[in-house]
Image: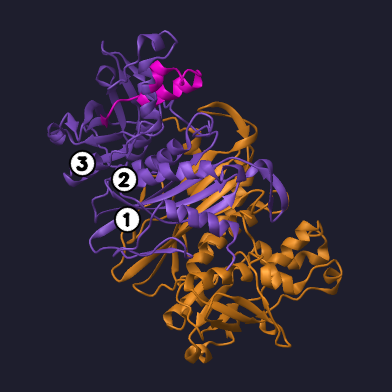
Chain colours: A orange, B purple
Amino acid sequence: MKMSGEDKLIERIRRRIPSATDGVLRLGIGDDAAVLRPVAGTEWAITCDQFIEGVHFLVDVHSPEVVGYKALARATSDLAAMGAIPRFFLMSLMLPASRSGRWLDGMLAGMSSAAEHFGLTLIGGDTAQSPGVGAHSSRFGKVADGKIAINLTVLGELETGKAVGRSGARRGDIVFVTGELGAAQLGLELILRGIHRQRRWKPLLTAHNHPHPAIKLGRWLVRQRLVSAMMDISDGLSTDLARLCRASHVGARINEQRLPVVSVPDGLQAKGIDAKALALHGGDDYGLLFTVPRRKAASIPSELFGTEVSQIGEIVSGNRVQLISANGKATPLLPKGWDHFS
Amino acid sequence: MKMSGEDKLIERIRRRIPSATDGVLRLGIGDDAAVLRPVAGTEWAITCDQFIEGVHFLVDVHSPEVVGYKALARATSDLAAMGAIPRFFLMSLMLPASRSGRWLDGMLAGMSSAAEHFGLTLIGGDTAQSPGVGAHSSRFGKVADGKIAINLTVLGELETGKAVGRSGARRGDIVFVTGELGAAQLGLELILRGIHRQRRWKPLLTAHNHPHPAIKLGRWLVRQRLVSAMMDISDGLSTDLARLCRASHVGARINEQRLPVVSVPDGLQAKGIDAKALALHGGDDYGLLFTVPRRKAASIPSELFGTEVSQIGEIVSGNRVQLISANGKATPLLPKGWDHFS
């Protein structure tokens, strides 16, 4: 029986990202919808995330493997921030015809590796030609060929009532972050300056290309019932902290000298790359930002699962977010991270 | 506290498509992920669907209200085909800056109306600028402004074990379809010929612009335990029947004179619009295609919830799908419906 081009593409995706049904997944990829049978005593965390050529990645800079890996890592980070165990994902793929061969194979390889690493099973999706520059046929006749867009919906499982949102931070809570701040943005700055192919800087691209969602760390924090609010840092500390404070109707005071700032080699500082600005406003780090009631703060180790955990300030009443310098001077910390609609 | 442009956009979406938490939805839009607490004895059907400018709709032909309505109706149709009750949805929106004002308001109004009609609550999403023609700033500097893409993930609830997939059709089963075949494609043909603005043809655009997912019908069929396989017809009968047969490892014989063919006015037949071709290969109808064991076929009424239900043929062994003409002649029914990667 003849298969349509779209069905052949879906078959290729199925082969490259295996999906086996189990006690929870009753019906997987290839039907009108997947069917999930929840386990008693569990809840589901669900979120979606786009990864778009020209907005989130560049095809002449990022390998297809990096694109596939990073698309899934970003989405999974949102599950980590809820304390959920990553379980399933769906992929909507908008693809120009020119990318449906080797590029797609590479992207699927990167995504498959991420899926295995994070414990995710592909359960469904949708494919469509991308409109833009070039030409292909659609139901409306010839339309231009276009950009790649990957949209991922991820589902995680967690114990009933254990999920931690953004709105629970209270006055007096201590503010923590995990990992180094600004490391991913440092990689992006190299790309923006066109020096990312220089051998001496290549190791600095790792955080930008291969972020690690804090899955174990998020699980540990939630299971210990230590945190009052939690989110991942995807658009930069200044922007994401403002979101947490707004959701919780509080302000915050952040101690500048406590920030786990990425170290920037002298040769790059000379090019105008400022470590403090990277740490405050740089995106794509995917560490966790969380708050802990003061009496429990001592229960948070300074390192967990090999990742640094840093106390960076405290929650205050009001709605102002301030940065406190080493000499005690307070300045407003304005959200200057990534903003897709500035 | 200053809100970023993206956060303001998300606030606008929240206001226009209300989302209230309940016993199942523990945490809704605005956090890293939504949290769902399943009800004992239920399963979840989940699927995603893209609706892309230039591929699935045209901004100079389809009003923003139609775009918002139809995007959600298409996705919901996949839940109807599983026999699920539509409950929640997430929206990823790729939007050029030029469409983030009045166009977006209109689109959200159409989507909100569809959500209310189908019983769906918005629980999350993602927004990004669209790359393409024109210019806006991204993390990579100025990039071109582009197309609109709406990706929707929908979740439906159903009784444990009741979901019906595509793979259960068996030799001897009777093949049914609901509604008229080709009505939506007729509207598209008017658009392709540039005559859709002529007053006399306007009523023929309704099926194309405002499809009705067969939610009640799908629920009824599943609860009565009458169907062996079911799917919705989104890409045309010939293409979707081939999918059902491939998933079930069977063939089918379809009686041409039994097809509920859309009626095409003489004035349009004269323009070369062929009703039979529309019925066999036209997409976007969103009726149900299902199979029923022969002994139960008499239990299927010829009309359900105001929609025509038609016996159109039978399942046979092998893998051939054939069309039987009034005089008994059999010809192969090749999948000639929509194919995004032909």
Q: In front of the other: label 1 or label 2?
A: 2
Pointer 2 residue = B118
* Dot placed on the residue nearer the N-terminal end, 3 or 2: 2
* Residue B94: % across, % down: 56, 47
Pointer 3 residue = B221
Q: Quadrant of the N terminus of chain B?
A: bottom right
Chain under label 3?
Answer: B
Classify mark 1: helix, strand or loop.
Answer: strand
Image check: A55 left or right of B226?
Answer: right
Pointer 1 residue = B44
Asked where in the image residue B168 lies, by quadrant, the reply is top left
* Dot placed on the residue nearer the N-terminal end, 1 or 3: 1
* Magenta-colored span: B177-202
Give the residue drawn at x 43%, y 36%: B66
* Residue A236: % across, % down: 63, 67
Instruction: Inspect this view and state whether residue B173 appears.
Output: yes
B68 versus A271 height, above or below: above
Classify mark 2: helix, strand or loop.
Answer: helix
Q: Amino acid at mark 2?
A: Phe
Q: Nearer the viewer, residue B117 or B228?
A: B117
Q: Nearer the viewer, residue B7 or B209?
A: B7
B267 versus B115 height, above or below: above
Residue B186 colored in magenta in the image: yes
Q: Nearer the viewer, residue B35 or A175?
A: A175
Give the residue drawn at x 63%, y 78%: A322
Q: In front of the other: label 3 or label 2?
A: 2
* Dot placed on the residue nearer the N-terminal end, 1 or 2: 1
Structural crowding at the residue carrying mark 2, measured as other residues with C-alpha within 10 Å and reported as few (<14), some (14–19) or many (≥20) = some
Structural crowding at the residue carrying mark 3, measured as other residues with C-alpha within 10 Å and reported as few (<14), some (14–19) or many (≥20) = many
Mark-to-mark CA distance, 3 and 2? 18 Å
